[in-house]
Image (cartoon, grey):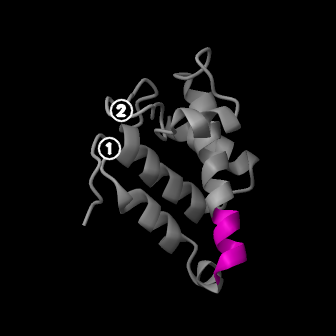
Amino acid sequence: MIDIIIEEGRKIGFNNREIACYLAIAKRQSGFHPDAANTDSTASGIAQVTDSTARQFGIDDSNRFNARASIRAGLQYLKRIRNKAIKESAHWAADPADHVRHVVSYRWPGTKEKRQ
């Protein structure tokens, strides 16, 4: 999974730090298991994207647990978050990982509570 994440991250133009952040997300969200599914929501796959987000990136029932498709969807979603943060905050330019660290730590998989 790690090799696929690095390969797909490079394809969309992520630098080493951004790929490392995505690796942290994948580790936290699914433990790198492409068949991971959250029992409390529709989140599934490597990055645990929900159905509504997954559809935006070409994920449906036919490829929901396809590792490469899941990784691409998660990376594209992270890229969207990054681009939005760049537009909205000069802080992103100072340390792009700060926003991603917040995203990674916001929820524990399978819980509804915000992580402290």
**In this picture, residue 10 sits left or right of residue 113:** right
* Residue 71 appears in the figure: no
Position in image of residue 50 (x %, y %)? 51, 37
Tell which circle, 2 or 1, labels the residue nearer the N-terminal end: 2
Q: Residues within 10 Å of mark 2 (few under 14, many from 20)?
A: some
| Rendered residue at 45%/35% (across/down) | 43
**In this picture, residue 70 sits left or right of residue 102:** right
Callout count = 2
Image position of 64 with respect to 57: above or below: above
Image position of 87 with respect to 64: above or below: below
Image position of 67 with respect to 62: above or below: below
Residues 100 and 113: in front is: 113
Residues 99 and 11: in front is: 99
Which residue is disc 2 drawn over? 38
Instruction: Tell me where the magenta segment starts and ends, as one range.
Output: 82-89
Give the quarter of the image for residue 91. bottom right
Residue furthest top as drawn: 62
Asked if the residue under mark 1 is in contact with the one under mark 2, i.e. CB atoms within 8 Å, the reply is yes
Which residue is disc 1 drawn over? 109
Task: Name which residue type carries label 2.
Answer: Asn
Position in image of residue 102 (x %, y %)? 43, 67
Q: Residues within 10 Å of mark 1 (few under 14, many from 20)?
A: some
Is most of the magenta stretch helix, strand or loop?
helix
* Residue 92 image label: none
**In this picture, residue 102 sits left or right of residue 96:** left
Magenta stretch encompasses residue 88 = yes
Q: CA distance from mark 2 to mark 1?
A: 7 Å
| Rendered residue at 48%/36% (across/down) | 46
